[in-house]
Image (cartoon, helix red, strand yellow):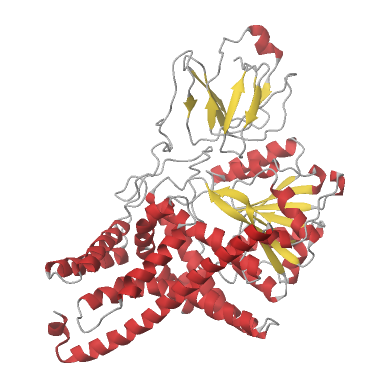
Amino acid sequence: MLEHIFKGYYPVYVAVLNILVHVAIALSVLVSLDRLVCILKYAFIRLKAFVTGKMPQQCWNFQPLPQDSHEYPMVAIQLPMFNERAVCQAIIDCCCEMNWEQSKLHIQVLDDSTDSKTRELVDERVLTWKERGVSISCLRRTNRQGYKAGAMKEGMEILSRQGYRYVAVFDADFKPEPDFLMRTIPHLHANPNVGYVQTRWVFTNPDESYLTKAQELSLNYHMKCEQYVHSATGSFFNFNGTAGIWRVHCIEDAGGWNSRTTVEDMDLSLRAYLKGWKAIFLDDVTCLNELPASFFAFRKQQHRWTCGPAQLWLKAHKDIWSSDLTIFRKLELTIMYFGARKCATHFVALGFFCTLVPLSILTPEVTIPTWVLVHLPIVVTLTTAAFTPKGWAYSILYVLFENAMGMVKLWAVITALLDLKRAQEWVVTTKLGSSDKRPGTTMMIPSCRIYGGELLFGIMLMSVGTLGLMQMAHWGLSSYMVVQGFVFMAFGFNMVDVGGILGGRMDREVISFGQQKAVTYARAGEHGVMQRQTTVPVIRLNRRDTIEPVESCPPEFALLEQSRPSSPSHSSASSVETLPSTSSTVLSESMSVIQIDANSSPTSKLSSLSLQGSSAVPRKGFRNTETQLTDIMV
């Protein structure tokens, strides 16, 4: 077929294709071996830890905090956000509930939001916690210069003048545990040469759709293997931008936050590494966060995450080679970290498997070894999926989705290397608050966007696969091409959002926002549990009917054992000051619903609500656990 197209130039085409295939095979083997070596290192480190009984993080000093909490170091928490109305209040609540001496902790909300509703929600929550005695402030800029890095830099200047020694950073969709600071600060406090501590991400919505499941497999490998191994072996590993804590002196010594790339976190951690600072990855300290369920948001996130490292490689290569690192570390950074992991990987996914391999099917003169096409990719895929529970069941899904995202990632690398205008694009990843619904959230509806690049690749792959099947040549590879082409088409028509062809949910008990599905309950006298994704604020009273600090906002509640109408005496006996812009739902045995809506000012009160002798006992786990409420009378 191609002979008729190229005619006299067909031999030239075959020669060029042969060269490109061999180059692509070399890159594919390099990328695969790098991943397999990382996995072997992980296995060795785990085996060593099992034999010695000592985990990698235990090799560092750990200095317990003083018994007198007034001697704790000064710690600040920075919360950068931009128009994230679905999750902005939840992260403020989480950080204000941290277990730390109140006089030694400050929450700094860096709100660049232009959306009036988001600003209102942030202001309400800040004012609420300030009235409760928490040291919290909200910093707003008149422009978004430097985006997240610019906001962090301006906030850091204020914190530095006020004498704070450590600063934790959380994106708006994260939910840190109350003991986060208690488990991370001692590592910084006892090791003066450690610049930052990174904790492991865990996810609230991996089963929401096929898209979030594929993301979970990828990020679990990155967190549980890559970051873990590089920290344990002393190699460079980057700060992930959130769920970590920095030494203020390290930030200042490395030159502060810089907006020259779209990965300000990697930029700062690289400059700190070149200055000689060390870093610790804590695998046993986790922080919940939300995976983007919107394909549009995911595309923007991956473009930024892929473009930024390539930008940084160009801007920092001179600093790498002029640093005091050993020649081995310099080569590791240049060739393996940036060259193979951050750039070559994306050329292999799209350029080799989705372009050169289909052309080889149509070109009998070009052959690719089976071990390159089948055996090596299977080993890499299964070992990658092993870091996710039952990940092997989604390994094919993971490969198909990763290849389909190759269009976005390869273009991101090209824009960075050519320093095109789009390389400076910084779009906040939209989060829907799927595990923590808050005021102002909206139902996610699949968008009508169409992506031409993915559609063209889908048509090409399906055509090549169909032709191969008709000619009974390479039937296994041709079948794969048809399936991969279908996935590209689904991406092109944006059918991976919830509700699309490839947007199905993994767990039918997960609730779509705005729907009341998967609610399990029983009639009077039976036990039942209402399953929901909404995080409902809980006001907990002790036996003297005084408000205690809220420790958790669980999504599931046991049915109330008793429900009796409130008497006038009870109504006048006490009133509860509610959180602003929140709603709580209470279910009685007869399944009657009382909706309490408080969208008024932070000082509004519900004089008609009386809680008598209530108690809340959360299970282990923060904000995503089941709480039992007993002896409540409304």
- Is 286 or 550 nearer to us in this picture? 286
Q: Percent position (x, y) of residue 374?
A: 33, 69
Q: Is residue 210 left or right of residue 580?
A: left
Q: Is residue 396 left or right of residue 250?
A: left
Q: Quadrant of residue 131?
A: top right
Q: Percent position (x, y) of residue 447?
A: 35, 50
Q: Quadrant of the C terminus?
A: top right
At x 67% / y 83%, what residue is drawn? 326
Q: Percent position (x, y) of residue 36?
A: 48, 69
- Is 263 or 162 nearer to us in this picture? 263
- Is 182 or 493 nearer to us in this picture? 182
- Is 200 or 575 nearer to us in this picture? 200
Q: Percent position (x, y) of residue 254?
A: 71, 71
At x 45% / y 41%, what residue is drawn? 442
As drawn, the residue found furthest toward the front would be: 51
Q: Quadrant of residue 351?
A: bottom left
Image position of 402 with respect to 1: above or below: above
At x 48% / y 76%, what residue is drawn? 340
Q: Is residue 543 left or right of residue 356?
A: right
